[in-house]
Amino acid sequence: MIDTRDKILEIAPESLDVAAIRQDFPILDEFENGQKVAYLDNGASSQRPEQVINAMLEYYHKYNANIHRGVYRWSEEATRGYEGAHRKVARFINAYTPREVIFTRNTTESLNLVAYSWGRANIREGDEIVSTVIEHHSNLVPWQVLATEKNAGLRFIPMTKDGQLDLTDLDTIVNEKTKLVTFSHMSNVLGTISPVAAIVKRAKEVGAVVVIDGAQSAPHMPVDVQALGCDFYAFSGHKMLGPTGIGVLWGRRELLEAMPPFITGGDMIRDVTLARSTWNDLPWKFEGGTPSIAEGIGLGAAVDYLTKLGMDKVRQHEIELTAYALEQMAGIPDLTIYGPTDARTRGGIISFNLGDVHPHDLATMLDRDAIAIRAGHHCCQPLIELLEATATTRASFYIYNTPEEVDRLVAALYKARKIFHLD
């Protein structure tokens, strides 16, 4: 194997102190089969640092109470922590105001909120919704349901052979019938980073609303929703060092204010009589019922952690690590790697297949060497079919992963070739 780490690091000397970061993640010291676990399934869910875990424990230990209604100290402190998390997220993505930051359960719920609330109020028969062929089911199925219900059309931006979105016919696909354009900022299978500026520009030329699935991008690169020019942006806490059960929908204030509520009940109301109800201000209008308070506080702590690291450094670390992994894996016989070959145009996700070995069998084999990776269709069945595969194996990196873990992955793949008689 060619060691390219020195060459890569010469390109970007400003990098993360990964050894120091790993000290904040005690789970990374866990052993399996006599080896430390190399956790390479960050595209599915990241690990949590002590700072996030402790912030949630502090809530449960010291001021566990419901928010907004109580006038006693615990409730007021919980309210400050939960609402403070909205402000932290707003700064993290450069929202115009924290009022535009809606807490949901995850990216899936955020996208469904847009489909059910904005979509059902604005999509009409004969309208068209445009997406892409690389989407996660969460950014496909809601629009399929909406299109069927409204008798609207669905059109898709294709991809090139190297996994990039093909914008050749963009002006035809996005046309005067298009009312909504939705796409992933970064593919969870290919790592492809979408050409946001070009797609948004065309969508705005025809007056379409733009929804971006940021589940894979918000944890890994700087995100500025004002600069992106989109109308909605969705992401999850559990992929960016935060807890499960908390997600974010950012939307332009004027759109959110015009939209009907998604979930009705407590705390999203202003006044209720037996005959009618009126709705609360943003963001509470879309946060009906007791929210995930500890999880919101944990998300705020995760944002603090990433902000302190600097998202530019996070992105640079993943470019370096992905470039190293791609170069090392390229020499493995019978290995097919999907997606762009330039680490600068993709995220820290590498999907691959090893000969005719089923990805589930390969993932099981790697687990024996304490290497945790993903196998399956990754909730992207249409894309996997376009790749002419039944499934793929996927390694995905984050701030605490190292070149040494990449070396272990590569060595395990060579070992797997012998075990499965590919030599």
Image (cartoon, rainbow, N blue to C red):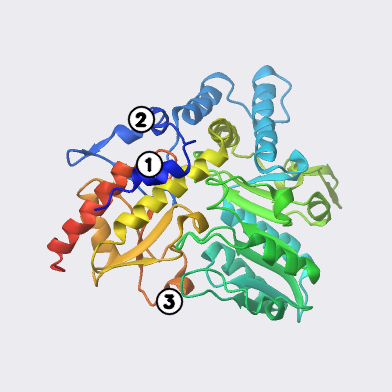
Marks 3 & 2, CB-CB < 8 Å contact: no
Q: Is residue 159 shown to the viewer in this render?
A: yes
The quadrant of the picture occupied by the C terminus is bottom left
Q: Circle 1 sits on which residue?
A: 401
Residue 66 percent coordinates (x, y): 64, 30
Residue 26 disc label? 2
Residue 243 disc label? none
Nearest the viewer among 352 and 152 is 352
Q: Residue at x 43, y 76 (%)?
A: 385
Q: Residue at x 83, y 52 (%)?
A: 254
**Three-letter amino acid code of the residue under disc 2:** Pro
When the figure is inspected, residue 261 is found, relative to residue 95, above or below; the finding is: below
Q: Element at badge 1?
A: loop
Q: Residue at x 69, y 32 (%)?
A: 83
Side of 235 where 419 appears, left or right: left
When the figure is inspected, residue 124 is found, relative to residue 210, above or below; the finding is: below
Nearest the viewer among 83 and 13 is 13
For the residues marked 3 and 2, what is the alpha-carbon distance in whole angstroms? 39 Å
Residue 385 disc label? 3
Count neighbours of disc 1 (C-alpha within 10 A) and say few if under 14, some if 14 to 19, many if 20 or more.
many
**Three-letter amino acid code of the residue under disc 1:** Asn
For the residues marked 1 and 3, what is the alpha-carbon distance in whole angstroms? 30 Å
Count neighbours of disc 2 (C-alpha within 10 A) and say few if under 14, some if 14 to 19, many if 20 or more.
few
Side of 132 where 163 appears, left or right: left
Question: Which of disc 3 and disc 1 is earlier in sequence?
Answer: 3
For the residues marked 2 and 1, what is the alpha-carbon distance in whole angstroms? 14 Å
Residue 268 percent coordinates (x, y): 75, 44
**Three-letter amino acid code of the residue under disc 3:** Glu
Residue 100 percent coordinates (x, y): 75, 45
Residue 283 percent coordinates (x, y): 75, 43
Side of 363 where 97 appears, left or right: right
Which of discs 2 and 1 lies nearer the camera? The answer is: 1
